[in-house]
Image (cartoon, rainbow, N blue to C red):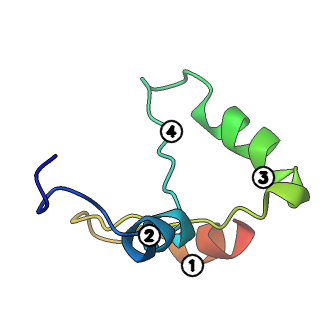
Amino acid sequence: MNRDRKMTVRQRNKIADMGKIFYIMGKSASGKDRIYSLLAAHKELNLKTLVLYTTRPRGTGWEELLLCR
């Protein structure tokens, strides 16, 4: 095995300690929010919400939407 490609134990542990990002995607009205709600209800999963960046202007009620999640 090439020495440059061999991972050290420290490198493997660092990768194992990193969090994972799960992205729910699908067509409009395909149940993405429902899946999110079901997963978020399982507090033992210790999931955190990530708000994606968008280039659209903020609409009315945007702050309230973020507070609800």
Q: CA distance from mark 2 to mark 4?
A: 32 Å
Instruction: Give me the disc on residue 40.
Output: 3
The residue identified by callout 4 is: 24
The residue identified by callout 1 is: 63
The residue identified by callout 2 is: 9
- Closest to the camera, between mark 1 and mark 3, is 3
Q: Earlier in the sequence, mark 1 or mark 3?
A: 3
Q: Earlier in the sequence, mark 1 or mark 2?
A: 2
Q: CA distance from mark 4 to mark 1?
A: 22 Å
Q: Note whether 21 is above or below 19 in the view shown.
A: above
Q: CA distance from mark 3 to mark 2?
A: 33 Å
- Closest to the camera, between mark 1 and mark 2, is 2
Which secondary structure, mark 4?
A: loop
Q: Are marks 3 and 2 in contact (CB under 8 Å)?
A: no
- Closest to the camera, between mark 2 and mark 4, is 2
Amino acid under label 1?
Glu
Q: Are marks 4 and 1 in contact (CB under 8 Å)?
A: no
Q: Earlier in the sequence, mark 4 or mark 3?
A: 4
Residue 33 % position (x, y): 64, 39
Amino acid under label 2?
Val
Q: Nearer the viewer, residue 64 or 37?
A: 37
Image quarter of residue 5:
bottom left
Q: Nearer the viewer, residue 38 or 58?
A: 38
Q: Earlier in the sequence, mark 2 or mark 4?
A: 2
